[in-house]
Amino acid sequence: MDKTSELGWPVLLILIGILIMLLLAIAVIAFFLVYQKRLFAQEESLRAIETAYQKELLQHSFVTQEAERKRIASDLHDDLGSILSATKIYLYQLNQKQAAPNYQNLKKEATELVDTAINQVRSISHNLFPPDLEHLGFLSTIENFCQRIQKMNNIDLSFHYDSIPSLTKQQELMLYRILQELVNNTLKHAQATQIKLLYKTLPKGFRMKYQDNGVGFEIPPKKNANKGIGIKNIESRANAINATFQFQSTADEGMWFTLDLPR
């Protein structure tokens, strides 16, 4: 009887140990399943956020295009249309029976209106697609743009570059539009006196660096719907050429912008 009792305790201890290990295994499996479920839920939430964000960007792109169409239509109808209508009136009045001084005045006014119409057409065309990109090339277009901004706005804009990799027409246009957006933001809001622009070739592609010494601004988090139109425009154009970018800004110390375009 004593021997049987002595043999029973080790067996019982072994059974208890096996039971404890089994319970631990079940707990680990249950924890893993719960963790996997939470992980899947988190991934699904992130996918939903990504989808909503991409949809919001696409919607913003449509809104921007529609606003651009309205602006061009307004330029054509209100500005160019009125100029051409006035020119038509002057040309109708131009005839040899007019007194000489009046004839010369009408001719001068008509000529000036034609010149204004030509400049307006050039401006509209330039906003649609900069002709310099087609005729002068990318770097010369950027240099001309920087010189024009510096001359017209009394701001020190320095542009430096080394060798530039071969770019597609779409990449050139998007980079030009991004620069326009950055400069417009600086001129309108930054109260800056200096802009620095650098184009640099990297082993894996092309880098653009932009900096001003303005008042800076608060940078919204990525994938935030409360971003301004300017940042959204930059983001949509960078996405169009598979470029990545980053903003940095400090109050009263200016803004830094870096864009990387892979080869």
Image: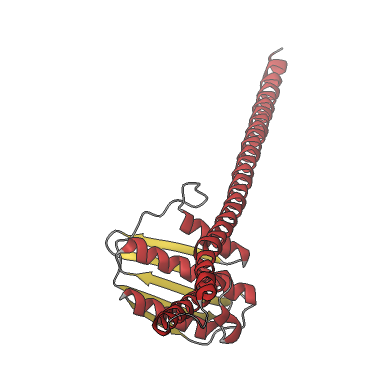
Q: Can the viewer see residue 250 in this picture?
A: yes
Which quadrant is the N terminus positioned in? top right
Single out the residue that lies furthest toward the front: 97
224 is higher (above) or lower (below) than 168:
above
Left or right of 12? Residue 229 is: left
Q: Quadrant of residue 70?
A: bottom right
The coloring applied to the image is: secondary structure
What is the total number of numbered labels drawn onto the structure image? 0
Residue 251 locus on image (x, y percent):
29, 58
Name which residue lies at 35% across and 80% down.
151
Name which residue lies at 56% across and 87% down.
136
Which quadrant is the C terminus positioned in? bottom right
Residue 55 locus on image (x, y percent):
62, 48
7 is higher (above) or lower (below) than 197:
above
Q: Quadrant of residue 13?
A: top right
Residue 131 locus on image (x, y percent):
57, 79
Q: Can the viewer see residue 259 in this picture?
A: no
Name which residue lies at 37% across and 66% down.
186
Single out the residue that lies furthest toward the left: 252
As rendered, which of 163 and 89 lies closer to the eye? 89
As rendered, which of 241 and 170 lies closer to the eye? 170
Left or right of 116? Residue 167 is: right
Residue 169 locus on image (x, y percent):
63, 76
Left or right of 166? Residue 143 is: left
Name which residue lies at 59% across and 83% down.
165
125 is higher (above) or lower (below) than 101:
above
95 is higher (above) or lower (below) than 211:
below
As rendered, which of 82 and 240 lies closer to the eye? 82
